[in-house]
Each structure stands twice: as structure tokens, then as C-alpha cells.
Amino acid sequence: MIDLLKDIFDNDILVKLVLSAPRRKSQEVKRIVIRPVIIGTGMMYQAELHFVNKVTHINMSSFEAADFTFDSVNSDFKQVNIFTTENDIQILANKPASPRITKKKPSMTREVLTHNKEKQYLISEGKPCDFLIKLGVMDESGKVFPKHYSKFRQINRFLEIVDDSVDIFDSSKTLKIIDFGCGKSYLTFALYYYFKILKGRKVQITGLDLKKNVIDLCNNISNELNYDELKFELGDIADYKDSGCDMVVTLHACDTATDYALINAVNWNSKLILSVPCCQHELFKQVKNKTLDPMLKHGIIKDKFTELITDGLRGLKLESKGYDVSMIEFTSLEHTSKNIMIKAVKNDKKTTAKMQKAQDEYERMKKEFNLKPCIDNLK
């Protein structure tokens, strides 16, 4: 295994390396991602160490990176997924002395970090991108219009979040995605472009919204771009019926519309849920707590507290249904302060005890603050 790792780093063919499946529940580092970086004029490798509540970075030379990866497998992690320009490689090392190594065709393109740790965008500036041109974000030469540069960055930020979880999907099957409350659909088009154009994946993507003029506009653009597996439908999240979806996106669905999207996603056993909630008003009149009443008498504080407790309850409910949940800072396309993303990844190995613990915490919070949230409809 060490010879394989040295060849990858020495020959400069690494795209991304992911160390996962911790050997011990108690270990502090839960996941490590290694990517090539440019520091000054030289190539280095940056390890991104994921703890429970923070992320740190280490920069290394090629031989240091090979040794670091090898030592990490032997001591801390049972699985390595390596994406290179030549192969995708998986190492299963339940027994470090006799790892099982498999290879298949490469699925990722090269991405290198700059010296100031700014990742090269998945959709590059200066390279014409058909949907961004059509939506007025860049011109025909690929130059991003100054007034839309923040939108360009936000689209790429969203795709980075998706890219970090793409390996959970079976690459041999058609990936079914729905975007609830898609609005102007910058990110819906971005999802299609990412999976279909950049990754060459089979996809079936649906955008759902209540505004007919928006749906008509998006369908027209999709047809003009020949995005054949991308369609837009008029409909309400609460009433939407489908046989199932691999990935559910709901960005800025207002108030309980977010809950109905999450309920649908769990009932479909979706592998990935990305949700940026908005307008969490439902619990504002319900929340009561004698200890916090002196603080909650101020409307602006109560409103912010309601937002946090609403999303906290949603996260616990998803955990109780077998999802690993994280809260990510995500700046919205509409320049709003609603920038917390709930990222939920289905974990089929999650124990009944952990799911029950999350449900118990959920019930305790409800009782403590006198709440009956809409997400309770998720049974």
C-alpha cells in the first residue's frame, strides 16, 4: 500500500483523497480530505482534518503526504477513497496488514488549490458555461458580470458541498434529484451541469415551484439548452407525490414548506438532503420557557431563538431517522441572513441506540419549550 501511495503523490496525479470510517468512536478526527495545493511556486498537499466542531489544515510535501496517509490508515481509518487522473482507487483496510484494493476508471477532473487556499471553482470563470450565459451571469466569452459575481461564487459554493458527498451515490444508476421551491433555478441548473456535463452521470432532475411564470421560463431555458433530463413542474411541496428520490434540495422554502420537503425526503429514504430553511415562524407563538421568558419578551430575540430551535429540532428528527446531520454556513443567492444549511446524509449503519437518543433529545426539547412543530408529522 505504501508503494501505491508514493506513486500517486510522487507522480502528481492526485485529485482528491478521502480517509473515512474511523477505527475508534473516541478518536477526535472523524474524516480527512487531502488535495493538491500550490504554495508559492511549488506543489504541496493539504490535509483537511474534520473534527466534530471544527476543521484544521496541514500542508505537506509529496513524501510526507504518502507517509501521513499510510500512518493514518494503520492507526485511525479503515477506508481510503483515492481519486486520481488515472484511476479511482478504494482501499478497505479493516486489517491494515492485508488491505483490499480495487480500481476503476477515473471519475473526477483535476482541481488544485491556490496558495491562499482558494479552491479552483468547479465552474471556472473565463470558460463559457451555457446555463450561466443563458441566465445572465456571464457573457459569451465566459466573463462573469461584476454585479453577478457573488451569485457565481455562491453557485460554486453549493456545488462544492455537493461534490464533498457525491461518492455516496451508485455511479451505475440514474440519479434522481428534486429541488423543492426551485425559484429562478440557478442551483437546479447548476446541479444538472455538475452531474451531467462535468461528471457524465445519468440524472433525472425536477424543479418544483408555485409560480407558473417561473416554471414556464425555466422549462424554456432547459429546452433551449437541450437539458433533456431536467424539467420544471408547478406544484406545492406539501402535496407533492413521487415514488422516490436519491437527493432532495430545498433552499429557502418558507416556514413549514421546509418540513414537508424533509418529510418527503425521509419517506423516500433519500441518501442526501440539502436544506436552507427560511422564515421559521411556526413556533414563534408556541415557544415558552420560564427561565428564558425575560429574554424572549423581546420580539427580535425571540424571532432569532425560534429560528435556531426550529432547525435544531429538524436536525434531531433527521438523526432519529438514520441520518448524519451537520449544519453548514451557506450564503444564499438572495443575499439574506438565512444562511444555515442542514446537510443530512443517510447512514444505513447508524445504530438504533443513536437514533433513539436523538428522538429522546427531540422530545425533551419539545417539552422544555412547549412546542408542537410541523416536523412531528414525520413518523
Image: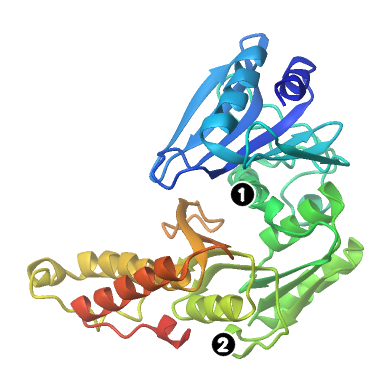
Q: Which residue is mark 2?
A: 238
Residue occupying image coordinates x 80% and y 50%:
133
How busy is the neighbourhood of tag 2: few (under 14 within 10 Å), some, or many (20 plus)?
some
The amino acid type found where label 2 is placed reads Ala
**Mark 2 or mark 1: whose residue is earlier in sequence:** 1
Residue 333 percent coordinates (x, y): 56, 56
| Residue 81 lies in quadrant | top right
Q: Residue 287: tell me if it is visible.
A: yes
Q: Which residue is mark 1?
A: 151
How busy is the neighbourhood of tag 1: few (under 14 within 10 Å), some, or many (20 plus)?
many
Residue occupying image coordinates x 37% and y 69%:
358
Residue occupying image coordinates x 50% and y 60%:
324
Q: How many marks?
A: 2
| Residue 70 lies in quadrant | top right
Residue at the far top in the pictured view: 41
The amino acid type found where label 1 is placed reads Lys
Q: Which mark is residue 271?
A: none
Q: Is residue 328 left or right of residue 183?
A: left
Q: Where 275 falls versus 209 (above or below)?
A: above
* Tag 2 and tag 1, C-beta contact below 8 Å: no
Q: Quadrant of the N terminus?
A: top right
